[in-house]
Amino acid sequence: MNGREKCELINQIRQKIADNNNIDFVIYDCTFDGECTGRCAKSDSELNYLERELEKRQNEGVKLNINGVFALDIEDKTIETQQDKSIKRQEKLEKLMENPELSDLPPRYMDMLL
């Protein structure tokens, strides 16, 4: 993950936190030209603003809402990874089944080999 991708992910998380907690929060387009590290003064100021607003609400006794904050685009990648694992497992199973010595092995034992 490069710096721009990190920054975008951080922005998505911050925006979702702000939305869940009814905080007016605007992320301005980045004007940085060069290799992004994923953090900069603009990013830090947005973070500080969001933290102050969350702290204000907490001090007022408002319960903070972070439900579903981390279920972003990452979720799609997790699902993809699980699918990949399932496919690899199936391929491994098929390869094991090619072995004549394992052909009459009960399925529960086959699972142990995977």
Image: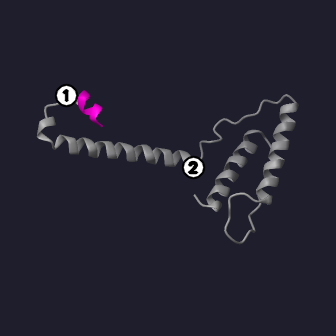
Asked whether 109 falls inside the magenta stretch, the response is yes
Which corner quadrant of the image does residue 8 belong to? Answer: bottom right
Asked whether 69 falls inside the magenta stretch, the response is no
What amino acid does circle 1 point to? Answer: Pro
Q: Nearer the viewer, residue 107 or 53?
A: 107
The residue drawn where x is 76% and y is 59% is: 40
The residue drawn where x is 87% and y is 37% is: 56
Q: Which mark is residue 106?
A: 1
Measured along the vertical axis of the image, is residue 30 above or below residue 98?
Answer: below
The stretch of residues the image draws in magenta is 108-114
Q: Main secondary structure of the magenta part?
A: helix
Q: Which mark is residue 78?
A: none
Secondary element under disc 1, as helix, strand or loop, is loop
The residue drawn where x is 57% and y is 49% is: 73
Q: CA distance from mark 2 to mark 1?
A: 40 Å
Residue 90 is situated, as x and y percent measured from the top left of the image, at 29, 43
Q: Which mark is residue 73?
A: 2
Quadrant holding the C terminus: top left
Q: Is residue 4 left or right of residue 102?
A: right
Measured along the vertical axis of the image, is residue 109 above or below residue 26?
Answer: above
